[in-house]
Amino acid sequence: MRILILRSSFQTDDFVRNEYADLIQRLENECHAEISILGDESVETQNLASLQTLPDAVMIATGGVENLFKRLWEAIDVEMMCSPLGHKTVTMIADGRNNSLAAALEVLTYLGNVGVEGRIVHGTNNEIISTLVRTHDRASLQGRIGLFGKPSDWLIASDVDRDFIRQHFGIETIDIHLQRLVDGIKTVPQTEAVKVAQTIVKRAKAVKEPTCADMVEAAKTYLAIKRICQEEHLDALTIRCFDIVKACGTTSCLALALLNDEGIVAGCEGDMQTLVSMLLAKRLCDKTAFMANPSQLTDETSMLAHCTIPLRMCDETVIRSHFESSIGVAIQGLLPLTDYTLFKWGGPQLDRYFVTEAKAIETPYSEHFCRTQITLKVNLKPYLLQHSIGNHHVIIRGRHAEKIRRFMQANGVTEC
């Protein structure tokens, strides 16, 4: 969470830090806030032209900052802020001291006049912190998701209520016909695709089944999907990938790996519940996630596997063909043996979740499973075989269970 504190030129940064010492400390500790202070007399030293969006919250520390806020607002792309992609409620903090509430009220009215929703968080330090935790948790998912085709036929329990996630989490969803992607693949310049393919091959430890032609077609798929993401301003996407195999003779596994590396959350098979789980991992934990199938369970370990994984999660990668079809390009990622969080958020209205932490003890390889395989030291049998939330789960490097639980508790979601 980024918080910008505004003060008048009659006060100093030291005054703000001393006056609001307890609140600032709690914002940093409990909201994990990155805080900066800006005074009217120092605004000329800020590179306002590069400001694209407001921070997560603006704290009004004193009166006399209304015009300072207006100057900051005019420096951002207002049209983008008001679009479905950029829309968000502008949150202000004002506890009332030093004429802060009066100034916040004037700013709130200004925002209303320009057609933007704003709100003031006001009260005791406890009330402010509690409200901000709930606000940040809920607002962190705002964005735009593209659905490339419908969910795969075998995913009979993995969809979400699109109206619900829009109303409760600000997630906009748009449908993208697969034919648009098929047509887009045909228009990707050969030279651009060759360049991408060569870069990926150089990064890999080895290339097994795919030919040079396979690599170029997979690169074209990546470039075509990326272009649509840019055109539609997508933060995330999921794709009915097996139809691309049939229509184009290639796979989207490489494309999804590269897009995840670039910050566009990308999942396969049209699985919306898992995609939202991946989006939360990105927004809440600042981590890319591995979408995988539970594949082999014992009383002590659980192995998961899939054919695409963000390259940045891997120590090494091997370029393989797609497991089920033996077509195109897939990724066999060799993951570090370290701590991971296994997570799934599911239900049509995202009303339940599962999370646990475990250490990876092996990155095995068997021809009987999807290409990237990881074994965690955790017994998932009681959960998966009786209460599982669908098929796919996500794996996040590091220990993030506590942070995820806080988010879920703030949003009234039940743990399995």
Image (cartoon, grey):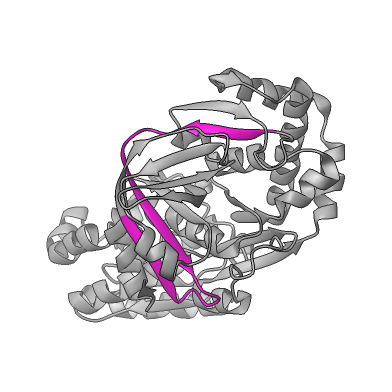
Residue 288 in view here: no
- Position of 84 with respect to 411 (left or right) is right
Closest to the observer: 313 or 114? 313
Locate residue 63, reporting x and y percent: 29, 72
Residue at (76% x, 35% y) in the render: 220
Q: Quadrant of the N terminus?
A: bottom left
Query: Is the stretch drawn in magenta largely helix, strand or loop?
Result: strand
Q: Is residue 344 magenta-colored?
A: yes
Closest to the observer: 279 or 304? 304
Q: Which quadrant holds residue 30?
A: bottom left
Residue at (31% x, 38% y) in the render: 338
Residue at (71% x, 35% y) in the render: 326
Query: Does residue 106 lie above or below 275 as drawn?
Result: below
Residue 307 in view here: yes
- Total count of labels: 0
Locate residue 69, reporting x and y percent: 42, 64
Query: Does residue 409 lie above or below 277 as drawn?
Result: below
Residue at (57% x, 39% y) in the render: 368
Query: Does residue 214 lie above or below 20 as drawn?
Result: above
- Position of 326 with respect to 16 (left or right) is right
Locate residue 235, reporting x and y percent: 59, 55
Q: Which quadrant holds residue 83?
A: bottom right
Q: Which residues are magenta?
A: 329-356
Closest to the observer: 208 or 77? 208
Locate residue 168, reporting x and y percent: 50, 77
- Position of 166 with respect to 359 (left or right) is right
- Position of 99 with respect to 193 (left or right) is left
Q: Is residue 338 magenta-colored?
A: yes
Q: Quadrant of the C terminus?
A: bottom left
